[in-house]
Image (spheres, grey):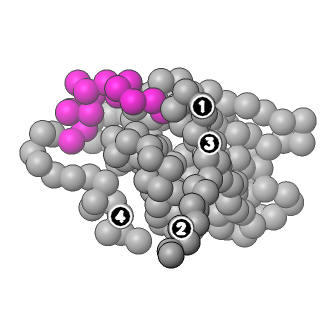
Amino acid sequence: MALVVAQEVPTSSSMAVPHGPAGVGEARHRMRDELYRSGVSESVVDDAVLILSELLSNACRYGRPLGRAERGEGDVRAAWRVDPAGGLRVEVTDGGGPTRPVPSTPSVTARGGRGLNIISALAQDWGVRDSATGEVTVWVVVTEGHRREDFAARVGGGSGFDFLDTYDDLD
């Protein structure tokens, strides 16, 4: 007689990520693994992993670490939660910074500035929450079928180039 024990897969997770590029890959891989095991669709997982990367990169570039640490020291917090209706909420919290997260309009030749526009195209909704202690949380809700395909096609170019696989290779 074999005994089968069901492993409960978490529907939410939170982790400290080093303030800097070092922890971004680990956070992406952990999120991807947990969401796949939770039964979240591949398209939502792919969008969520890209969104998490953008949020963490912005937190490390523009925000301070949590607590009183100096830039480049300490952590930011990444969290994700699957709600009962199947939506996914992704949050990144940092120690605040001199500017507010807002989408920009970069020139065609600009090397950056598109992250929040990409998030806007992939997300059902997103926003910014400030705490009384100065922490800033950027939250994003991702659902199946919400991605604006016209924007995603322009970003990917329709060439068969898989951006997320290449991005994961940077770890």
Q: Earlier in the sequence, mark 2 or mark 4?
A: 2
Q: How many angstroms separate mark 3 from mark 4 (CA)?
A: 22 Å
> Which amino acid does the dot numbered 3 rest on?
Arg
Q: How far from the left and from the top, in percent, is residue 23?
A: 57, 68
Element at badge 4? Answer: helix
Of the numbered discs in the image, which one, if any, rests on residue 84? Answer: 1
**Residue occupied by mark 3:** 81
Q: How far from the left and from the top, in percent, is residue 111?
A: 35, 48
Query: Would residue 146 be counted in the magenta stretch?
Result: yes
Query: Would residue 45 be counted in the magenta stretch?
Result: no
Q: Earlier in the sequence, mark 3 or mark 4?
A: 3
- The span picked out in magenta is 142-156
> Which amino acid does the dot numbered 2 rest on?
Val
Is 48 drawn above or below residue 14 in the view shown? Answer: above
Q: How many angstroms separate mark 2 from mark 3 (CA)?
A: 27 Å
Q: Quadrant of residue 66?
A: bottom right
> Which amino acid does the dot numbered 4 rest on?
Asp
- Nearer to us of marks 1 and 4 is 1
Q: Earlier in the sequence, mark 2 or mark 3?
A: 2
Few, some or many residues within 10 Å of mark 3 (<14, 14–19, 20+):
some
Q: Earlier in the sequence, mark 2 or mark 1?
A: 2
